[in-house]
Image (cartoon, coloured by chain):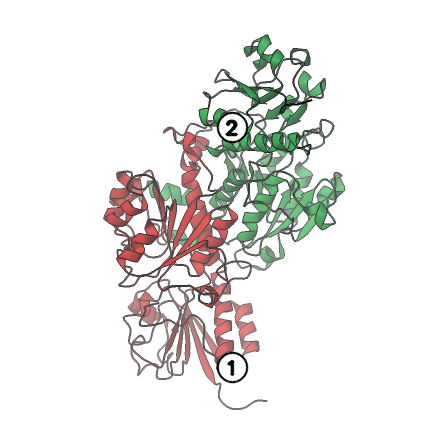
């Protein structure tokens, strides 16, 4: 069957060369979709991105696959109906006219980041608990010694039986939970809304095969709530380690500050570890620095900071018990392959007239 | 004969001061235990010759149970009453020539089974430190360098869909399988004898509850054998990483040499690796067992020639590794000084395992980790 104009026009505006095989697979699978690929610079700067795209590129676009390349106005893109982001967060589109337009679904790539981010969460924590920085420095000096200079080698212990609190039990949190459980830990989940039934505990989104926690069976305890009291109640559950994996919204800005770190430490009775892979502003950073310096917290691993790049003079860099990496945990050489797997799922659903996955709830902010 | 069990004279020879909570626990579990805690010199180690002479003869003479790490009675004649030696290590290779091992049949049990979690944590940590290029990020942190542009050069792949081969599917191998499987990787297990039935794949040994692979259901493929051919078949099965978790015995000495590294590196990794954009890393080797299982010179060559993508070694040949050993300078190598099993929970778990074992013994059941002197472990 032939003839007639394509039903959909998909524009991929991403900072990568067109992956010919993967796109040809999509073209074969969806003959009614016209697929155009434009490589744009790796930046959120709108002016730079605009320069990379030809005029009139938006005219027929009904589906947009992008990180941060958006049409300036509705008039430029009158047919736009779906924006499929390549990031888990949607903050970069929230100030655009697209956010305020009812007829446009904005979808995130939540679900494709779980495995690689969870790997980062686990290994940076183990670098701390196994004193790897000191061992690495000894290796550089060809020094066969367990002495890492601070007596820390006598305090190493494994994670069996310890309690990990996962703030935000989404796709990333679930993969962290899966790993923590495999390591013998007790997983305590925290969600915005209550998850008191099996249906509510199920993960409806995209899951990389062989990973995640689809049925929500990993946690032994569940807590919830966006108010301070609920958060504090969770923080008082004898947690040895807390992983921050919530989206950044007005409710979660500075979610954890001095008071929260104190509660986490059971008022000094323990030295918990904090990991942040979400967004820097979820933690009150000066409060975090203070808690790391005065021993309220045992250590922290941060892949996100406030702001980014982290200024050269930030105290975080030199804290012996802090690991800082430049927002790398979500990167993956085959990121595009996974993002396109997710796009494929949504193209299928659109074709069948079904609801898309990962559609952002604008009221919630994620 | 009436009354309870016979009095046991338990001798504990360790380098730390007496852990009172432990001796109290033992007394509570076994009221018929008469416990002597003998603190040996702190520098007693695996290389200590005649460490046993630190202990007076009359103390050896009355001992019926010995709990120890580095100290053995110098010869069997000194210990006519000794029924059991519980060793706080997994391997006994460094004692294969000791009179107690060679010339007596006093039952020896090891603490194999307690090492799974800490050693696996070390394996995961070093494997990911390598695959996620952490050393570079660590140096950047020291320089306060964010590397916004440069970080694009560090991007690699994750372990989803990759294949990890585990040589030696004991308690350490099984816990490594558990965690790599949670990362989304597929496991190929390699054992000495075939495991063709569910019963054969079950872990009948001791393992820390909540860990391991008790039913042996994690591996997607099983390989076995003690011949070169069977080893080579396993090594050619498309591995992205190989974990060496075997005991050191005369037949595993230099088991992995140039030919084996070439096979491992030449197989090209798993299907996933071959098909993934940017996923072409050469296989990664992990050794947490004993240095001499690898031909270390051949390993250095394999690393420098990039036959292998890298290696994480917690054990070397010899230990300590001399300052000028070429291994230190090999490409893409991580070396730590035999620390992977260490941790605050180690001794407590070792004692718990002894308690489990002695209770089984008193019930007439077999104990875990009884050394088979013929096998060497």
Per the image, the residue denoted by label 1 is A352
Rendered location of residue A337, percent (x, y): 51, 64
Q: Is residue A308 visible?
A: no
Give the CA distance from mark 2 to mark 1: 69 Å
Magenta stretch: give its range.
B214-218
**Residue at the spot 32% in from the left edge and 39% down from the top edge:** A269
Q: Colour of chain B?
A: green
Whether residue B61 appears in magenta in the rendering, the answer is no
Answer with left or right where residue B118 lies relative to residue B263: left
Crowd band around label 1 with a 10 angstrom C-alpha radius: few (<14), some (14–19), many (20+):
few
Q: Secondary structure at mark 1?
A: loop
Q: Is residue A195 visible?
A: yes
Name the residue nearer the viewer: B43 or B298.
Answer: B43
Whether residue B216 appears in magenta in the rendering, the answer is yes
What numbered label is drawn on residue B321?
A: none
Rendered location of residue A346, percent (x, y): 48, 74
**Residue at the spot 51% in from the left edge and 28% down from the top edge:** B28
**Dot 1: chain letter:** A
Q: Colour of chain A?
A: red
Per the image, the residue denoted by label 2 is B28
Rendered location of residue A132, percent (x, y): 43, 37
Q: For the image shown, how many numbered marks are present on the structure?
A: 2
């Amino acid at each position: 069957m032939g003839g007639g104009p394509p039903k959909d026009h998909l524009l991929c505006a991403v900072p990568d060369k067109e992956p010919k095989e993967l796109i040809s697979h999509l073209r074969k699978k969806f003959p009614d979709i016209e697929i155009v690929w434009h490589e744009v610079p790796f930046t959120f700067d709108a002016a730079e991105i605009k320069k990379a795209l030809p005029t009139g590129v938006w005219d027929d676009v009904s589906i947009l696959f992008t990180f941060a390349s958006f049409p300036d106005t509705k008039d430029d893109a009158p047919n736009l109906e779906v924006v499929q982001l390549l990031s888990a967060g949607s903050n970069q589109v929230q100030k655009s006219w697209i956010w305020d337009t009812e007829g446009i679904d904005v979808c995130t790539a939540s679900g494709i980041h779980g495995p690689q981010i969870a790997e980062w969460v686990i290994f940076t924590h183990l670098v701390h608990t196994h004193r790897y920085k000191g061992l690495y420095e000894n290796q550089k000096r060809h020094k066969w010694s367990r002495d890492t200079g601070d007596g820390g080698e006598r305090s190493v212990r494994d994670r069996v039986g310890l309690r990990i609190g996962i703030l935000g039990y989404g796709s990333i949190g679930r993969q962290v939970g899966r790993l923590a459980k495999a390591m013998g830990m007790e997983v305590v989940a925290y969600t915005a809304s209550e998850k008191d039934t099996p249906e509510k505990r199920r993960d409806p989104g995209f899951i990389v095969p062989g990973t995640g926690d689809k049925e929500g069976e990993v946690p032994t305890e569940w807590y919830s709530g966006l108010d301070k009291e609920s958060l504090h109640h969770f923080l008082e559950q004898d947690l040895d380690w807390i992983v921050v994996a919530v989206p950044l919204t007005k409710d979660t800005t500075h979610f954890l500050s001095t008071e929260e770190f104190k509660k986490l430490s059971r008022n000094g009775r323990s030295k918990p570890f904090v990991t942040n892979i979400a967004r820097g502003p979820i933690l009150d950073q000066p409060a975090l620095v203070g808690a790391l310096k005065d021993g309220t917290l045992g250590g922290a691993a941060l892949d996100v900071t406030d702001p980014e790049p982290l200024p050269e003079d930030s105290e975080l860099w030199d804290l012996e018990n802090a690991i800082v990496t430049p927002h790398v945990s979500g990167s993956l050489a085959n990121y595009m392959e996974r993002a396109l797997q997710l796009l494929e799922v949504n193209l299928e659903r659109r074709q069948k007239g079904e609801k898309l996955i990962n559609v952002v709830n604008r009221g919630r902010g994620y | 004969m009436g009354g309870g069990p016979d009095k046991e004279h338990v001798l504990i020879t360790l380098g730390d001061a007496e852990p009172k909570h432990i001796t109290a626990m033992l007394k509570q579990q076994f009221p018929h235990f008469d416990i002597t805690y003998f603190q040996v010199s702190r520098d007693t180690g695996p290389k200590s010759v005649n460490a046993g002479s630190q202990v007076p003869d009359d103390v050896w003479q009355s001992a019926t149970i010995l709990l120890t790490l580095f100290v053995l009675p110098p010869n069997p004649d000194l210990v006519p009453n000794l029924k059991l030696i519980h060793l706080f290590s997994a391997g006994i290779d460094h004692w294969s020539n000791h009179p107690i091992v060679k010339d007596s049949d006093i039952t020896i049990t090891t603490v194999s089974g307690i090492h799974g979690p800490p050693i696996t944590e070390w394996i995961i940590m070093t494997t990911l430190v390598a695959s996620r290029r952490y050393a570079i990020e660590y140096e950047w942190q020291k320089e306060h360098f964010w590397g916004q542009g440069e970080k694009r050069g560090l991007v690699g792949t994750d372990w989803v869909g990759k294949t990890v081969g585990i040589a030696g599917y004991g308690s350490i191998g099984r816990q490594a399988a558990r965690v790599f499987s949670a990362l989304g990787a597929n496991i190929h297990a390699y054992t000495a004898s075939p495991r063709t039935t569910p019963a054969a794949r079950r872990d009948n040994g001791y393992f820390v509850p909540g860990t391991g692979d008790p039913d042996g259901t994690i591996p997607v493929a099983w390989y076995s054998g003690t011949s070169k051919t069977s080893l080579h078949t396993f090594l050619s099965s498309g591995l992205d990483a190989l974990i060496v978790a075997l005991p050191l015995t005369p037949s595993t000495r230099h088991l992995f040499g140039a030919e084996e590294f070439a096979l491992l590196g030449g197989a090209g990794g798993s299907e996933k690796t071959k098909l993934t954009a940017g996923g072409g890393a050469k296989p990664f080797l992990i050794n947490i067992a004993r240095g001499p299982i690898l031909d270390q010179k051949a390993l250095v060559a394999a690393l420098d020639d990039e036959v292998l993508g890298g290696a994480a070694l917690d054990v070397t040949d010899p230990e300590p590794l001399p300052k000028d050993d070429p291994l230190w300078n090999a490409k893409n190598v991580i070396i730590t000084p035999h620390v992977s099993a260490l941790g605050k929970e180690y001794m407590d778990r070792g004692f718990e395992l002894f308690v489990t074992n002695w209770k089984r013994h008193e019930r007439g059941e077999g104990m875990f980790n009884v050394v088979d002197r013929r096998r060497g472990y």
